[in-house]
Structure formats: C-alpha cells, structure tokens
Amino acid sequence: MTILITGGAGYIGSHCCVTFLEAGHDVVVVDNFSNSSPESLNRVASITGRKIAFEEADIRDRTALERILKTHQCSGVIHFAGLKAVGESTEIPLEYYANNVTGTLELLAAMNACDVRQLIFSSSATVYGEPQFLPLTEDHPLSATNPYGRTKLMIEDILRDLAASDPRWRFGILRYFNPVGAHKSGLIGEDPRGIPNNLMPFVSQVASGRRDQLSVFGNDYDTRDGTGVRDYIHVVDLVEGHLRAHEALAALTDETNSFTVNLGTGTGYSVLEMVKAFERASNQKIPYEIAPRRAGDVAEVYADTKAAEAKLNWSAERGLEDMCSDTWNWACKNPKGYEASDG
Ligand code: NAD
Ligand code: UFG
C-alpha cells in the first residue's frame, strides 16, 4: 500500500519522502510546485536510490485526487500542501483560505470517496496564539492572530468534527514548532523564494554573503537576552516524528480515533543564541542590527514534549549544532537552492 504525500516536493515533505522510503514504504507525491521544484524529488531519488512517484496536481482538484488515490492504491495521506507565510497571509487571505482550507476539504472528500480515511496533518504551534503558560501543552487554549494561523485552526476543527462524526477516520494532528536544518547529504533543504521570512534561512544567507546583515526583531522582550525564544527542531527529527505518528495511527481505535501532539524539542533558543551557534558551525561572522519588534511576534515559545513521547514513543535527537551545520552544508552545496538544477 502507498502513502500519498501532499506537498511532498516542499521543504518538510521532501525530507519526509526520504524517511518513509528508507523505512520501506511506497509513496506518491502530489504537488503543484507553487513553492517548490521537481528537482527536490530527483534529489530524494538520489538519496534513497528509489524512484519516486509523483503527480503534478493541485489539492483543490478533487477529481485528480480521486484518480491518484485509486491508481496508486493509497492507504493513507500525509498532508503538507498549503501556503505558510504569516505576513503574506495578511495580504492575500483568500489564497490562504482557498489553498489551505478548501484544499483540505477537497482532499478529505476525495479520500472519503475512495475509502481512504487515514491522515496526518501539518499543524503549527501558531495555533496556541500568545502563550498563557510554558511549556505549551496540547491542552493550552487555542487562538489565531492571522489568516495563516486561522487556516490551521480551522483545519484542526474540521478534522476533530470529522473524527467525531465517523469512527472510521484516523487522524494524527502534529503541531510543529520551528523546523530548521537539512538532510545530512546536503542534497535537500529549505529553498525559500525571495527574501526569507524565517530566521534560519536568513542567517544562512547572511553567512554566505547573499545578504549584508540580519535584522534582529526586538531585543526588549522578557527573555534571557531580550530577543525572541523559539523551539527549533531539526527537520529530520520532525519527519521521524511523522513515521512514529504513522505507526501510532494503526493502534488507534474507533473510540479514540485521533491524536494531537507537539513536535518540538522542549528547549528554546534566543535569536542571538542561534546567531552564535550558526557562527560556530559556519565559521563565518554574522553581522546584525537590532530592529523594531516584528508585528505579531511573541516573546517565547517552546513545547511540552511529553505527549509525543507517550503517544508516539518519539523525541527529538539532534541538537543545535546539527541544525546549524546541516543548514550550512546545504547552503554551501546549493548557493542558489534548486534553481541551478532547474534547467
Ligand atoms: P513548503 O512551502 O516548502 O511545502 C509546501 C508544499 O506544498 C510546496 O511544495 C508547495 O508547492 C505545495 N503546495 C502548496 N499549495 C498546494 C496546492 N494547492 N496543491 C498542491 N501542492 C501545493 O512548506 P514546508 O515548510 O515544507 O511546510 C509544510 C507544511 O508544514 C505546511 O502545511 C506548513 O504550513 C506546515 N508548517 C511549516 C512550518 C515551517 O516553519 N516550515 C511550521 C509549522 C507548520
Ligand atoms: N527573527 C529575526 N529576524 C529575522 C527573522 C526572524 O529576529 O529576520 C526572529 C523572530 O522575531 C522570532 C525568531 O527569529 O523571534 C523566529 O522567527 P521565524 O520567522 O523563524 O519563526 P516564527 O516563530 O515567527 O514562526 C515559525 C513559522 C510559522 C509557524 C511558527 C510555529 O514561520 O509558520 O514558526 O511556531 F507557525
């Protein structure tokens, strides 16, 4: 049986393909390449030595999804496809609701029609809103402050409603903290288009000389050095969490047919600690300036990891050094991301 991976050509999806292929699973990727390149799938094939099936399609195309689910005899879905930039979501909210919410609804309808009722969903720590206590446990109150976050919350609610309505469904909702790093080979990694929004890709581009300096968004937060603290998790640890989640879905019952867990390390690092760690890993100086706070940012976010340990028998293994050195290895080997290989 084959697992359908939506958004499998993207940053996390491509690493997930490697982990699942290496664990002996068959996968088929559906991606519209709106934020990725087919080259990432060639690289997945190089790493694993296995040919990878992929179908270029939009997840809003229910007919295409039904055909793909049937043709590849899929038994379950890992659902990464969607738009993910918080700032952009405030500018083009309809695109976010259409891709993320409508896309998920079409996917679920196609799955239902094909009797495939097992799904792992990429949610985000953004659904916790402003933390009321730390570490964040899965029962922390949920809220959203931007359209991107609202799409994640809406999809979670849809999955919870569906799980309650029909015991045949099996859902694993995974709330990611801050995925960083790249595969050890340096063949796949994060390849943002334009100016990176996120800290690690920006720092990496400063280290490689593509950008002059980092703007540190605020140094007057109530944190140990005044800069924002986040729970960075190595992308390979993150996708190994998906493999454990896939196994855990099989153990669910009609009475308890879903779970929701955080995927983080439980440890937070500040922006300046990340900069220092990256300087050590890359042996490059990272010039920075202190800039005003970024709208919508919170001071500190990190996960409680007990539920993941108990329900998935999983915890993150890779530390900050690996996160930085693997990011740097990917950046050095692919100074223009996948672009140079796109032809
Ligand atoms: P990504 O943009 O690299 O990957 C998403 C993939 O989905 C891309 O390949 C894109 O082309 C594809 N896609 C987008 N809309 C599509 C559509 N309508 N039909 C078919 N394919 C479509 O992003 P990522 O970092 O790999 O994130 C994967 C998932 O994890 C997303 O749902 C994201 O919201 C979630 N997430 C990411 C982070 C993060 O920091 N990277 C944090 C929390 C949650
Ligand atoms: N930061 C800077 N300068 C930059 C970029 C970021 O100082 O150029 C700071 C931010 O202010 C924050 C930290 O670095 O304190 C991390 O910022 P990121 O943009 O890398 O990550 P966020 O925590 O803001 O958000 C990310 C994803 C969201 C997801 C969230 C889950 O972008 O989609 O993690 O925790 F919802």
Image (spheres, helix red, strand yellow):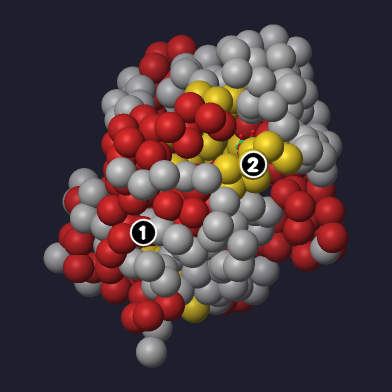
Mark 2 residue type: Glu
Point 80% across, 29% down: residue: 143
Point 48% across, 41% down: residue: 179
Say if disc 1 is inside 8 Å of ligand 2.
no
Q: Picture quarter containing residue 314?
A: top left
Q: Residue furthest top?
A: 133
Q: Secondary structure at mark 1?
A: helix
In the displayed structure, 102 sits above or below 306; it is: below
Point 53% across, 15% down: residue: 304
Which image quarter is the N terminus in? bottom left
Mark 1 or 2, nearer chain start = 2
50 vs 67, nearest the viewer: 50
Indicate the position of residue 65 as horizontal and vertical percent values.
55, 69
Point 72% across, 32% down: residue: 218
Judge whether residue 216 can be spotted in this image. yes
Q: Residue furthest bottom?
A: 343
Mark 1 residue type: Ala
109 vs 96, nearest the viewer: 96
What residue would you read off at disc 2?
Answer: 289
Callout 2 crowding tier (Cα within 10 Å): few <14, some 14–19, many ≥20: few
Q: Which mark is residue 39?
A: none
Along the horizontal axis of the image, is 140 left or right of 308?
A: right
Along the horizontal axis of the image, is 137 left or right of 50?
A: right
Indicate the position of residue 222 as horizontal and vertical percent values.
71, 14
Q: Residue furthest left?
A: 49
Q: Which mark is residue 331?
A: 1
Judge whether residue 72 can be spotted in this image. no
